[in-house]
Amino acid sequence: EEAEALGRQVASAVASHNVLVCEPIAASTPWSSLASPELRAVASADSAAGVPSPRGIGRPVISMAWESSQPVVAADRARVFAHRMLGQAFAAETLQPPPPAQLLLLWCGGGQPQSELHLARVLVPVVSPSTPLGVVAPKLQRARLQASTSSHQGTGHFLLCKYYDETRVAAVVLQEPEQSTRLCLLDVSELQFHPSPSGFDSSHAAVQALPPAVAAFDGLFCVDFSDPLPESYMWASALRVMSQRGVASIYAWRARRLITLDTQAEEEEEDEDNGDEPEED
């Protein structure tokens, strides 16, 4: 409640200076889709008690990133340079302005037979700073991925996720019934997004109205898959990534375990210890 009140105060303060679009996200807990009664019971208790990540496992965590428009700007600069080298005049008005950067959203959502990976894009048109709040209508798009393959008879669940960079996603996947946990790296640059006029509601009815989820591991999306992690990581409660260093860390608060994986090495190197718990987001 305190965090929500602070969020409203920040939104109000920012809105007095800039155009602001507020879009609610109704994300259901991914643990609600698990078959394991033990995991579901713990997640439900953590959620009811309001225990946040990295300690609790009952509340979905939303990851955000910005989709850059730099490639378009670089292309325009190259065109100007080429015209100047040829001694040709180049009218400034022929330059195409780069599209506005899009906000990328990512979360794991339950409520279905499998907890899915939800991806969303928010494009806010560029308008005058004097435009009143609520006049600007953002363009909303979303897509869904399932942690399944046609060759495996079990059920996969996306539990934790983070944007690794603007085109790749790191996610923790739990496979049932064997309760095997892995880290996967997905390339979502070619993922097809669909308009979402109803917003980002993750209720069963809202999700059923969307196009079917795409199997993440049957197509061109899966970049890398770790070996199965130790059993204690079925309690994974937090995921941290650092693409600059090529690492991802998974923390299991109940087991007091922290593992760091090298996401760039050809042969994965793992460094596991009883380290201190990571800071909360």
Image (spheres, grey):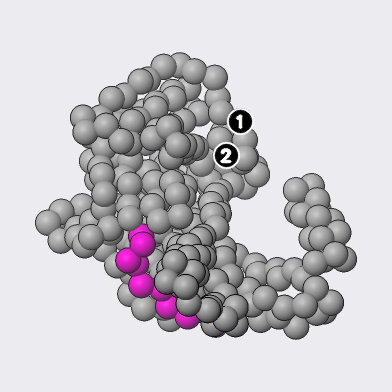
Q: Residue at x 45, y 55 (%)?
A: 166
Tag nearer the camera, 2 or 1 = 1
Q: Which residues are magenta?
A: 188-197
Please name the amino acid that badge 1 sits on.
Glu
- Residue 237 in the image, given as x and y percentages of width and height: 49, 37
In depth, the one of 19 and 50 nearer the eye is 19
- Residue 6 in the image, given as x and y percentages of width and height: 80, 51
Identify the element where label 2 is drawn: loop
Residue 54's label in the rendered image is none
Q: Is residue 180 magenta?
A: no
Q: Residue at x 43, y 23 (%)?
A: 257
In screen coordinates, is 44 left or right of 171?
right
Q: Furthest residue to the front?
A: 87
Please tell me whether residue 138 is drawn above or below residue 215 in the rendered image. below
In depth, the one of 261 and 55 nearer the eye is 261
| Residue 258 visible in this rendered orientation of the protein | yes
Q: Furthest residue to the top?
A: 274
Q: Which residue is mark 2?
A: 53
Q: Residue at x 23, y 60 (%)?
A: 220
Q: Which residue is mark 1?
A: 279
In which quadrant of the rendered image does the C terminus lie?
top right
Tell me the quarter of the picture where residue 245 sits: top left
Please tell me whether residue 280 is drawn above or below residue 221 in the rendered image. above
